[in-house]
């Protein structure tokens, strides 16, 4: 399980260092083999350990190409999926296409999301987070049934 937020930075070559607290786990469950792709719901990236990505890929394969939203999700997620490997310094290279999509520059954040990570432009994350926090308690924003059943 990956959880928590961390500040990260990209170097001039587009590499980012995975926080050290996650590296050992990534080596253990995936031998440092990862898959990054765009998040089709937000301007961020998803980073999966390879075994977790393979589960997602199987789920995507089960979606119908005759359903437009399913087809678009498959095109985006599989089309931009890029294999990467942690290097000796615990870094991965983020391809230019993915950096452009997520508007990644020098400052970024990484969010643990259980089976994967989200990687956001730092300013973009802060803006989106503040927007979402502003919606909390909004009477017009009715929680989904799934959220209503969640006991915290």
Image: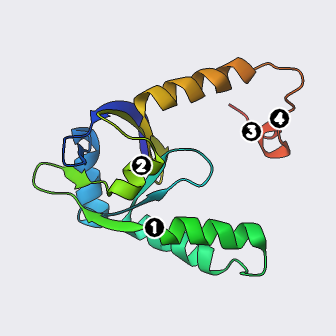
Question: Which mark sits nearer the N-terminus, 1 or 4?
Answer: 1
Marks 1 and 4, how far apart at CA: 29 Å
Q: How many marks?
A: 4
**Mark 4 residue crowding within 10 angstroms, few (<14) / some (14–19) / many (20+):** few
Check disc 4 and report the residue beneath it. 143
* Residue 150 tag number: 3
Marks 4 and 2, how far apart at CA: 32 Å
Residue at the spot x=35%, y=31% of the render? 6
Q: Is residue 1 visible?
A: no
Residue at the spot x=15%, y=57% of the render? 87
In front of the other: 150 or 122: 122
Which element type, helix, strand or loop, lies under badge 3?
loop
Question: Which mark sits nearer the N-terminus, 1 or 2?
Answer: 1
Q: Is residue 124 visible?
A: yes
Mark in the foreground, 1 or 3: 1
Question: Which mark sits nearer the N-terminus, 1 or 3?
Answer: 1
Q: Is residue 90 left or right of residue 88?
A: right
Marks 3 and 2, how far apart at CA: 35 Å
Which element type, helix, strand or loop, lies under badge 2?
helix
Image quarter (top left, top right, bottom left or bottom right) of the C terminus: top right
């Amino acid at each position: 399980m990956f959880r928590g937020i961390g500040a990260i930075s990209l170097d001039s070559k587009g590499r980012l260092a995975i926080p050290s607290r996650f590296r050992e786990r990534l080596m253990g469950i995936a031998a440092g083999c990862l898959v990054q792709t765009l998040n089709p719901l937000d301007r961020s990236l998803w980073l999966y350990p390879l075994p977790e990505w393979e589960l997602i890929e199987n789920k995507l394969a089960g979606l119908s190409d005759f359903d437009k939203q399913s087809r678009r999700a498959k095109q985006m997620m599989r089309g931009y999926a890029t294999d990467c490997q942690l290097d000796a310094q615990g870094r991965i290279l983020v391809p230019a296409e993915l950096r452009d999509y997520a508007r990644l520059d020098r400052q970024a954040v990484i969010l643990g999301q259980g089976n994967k990570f989200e990687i956001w432009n730092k300013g973009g994350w802060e803006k989106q987070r503040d927007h979402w926090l502003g919606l909390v308690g909004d009477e017009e924003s009715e929680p989904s049934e799934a959220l209503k059943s969640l006991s915290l």
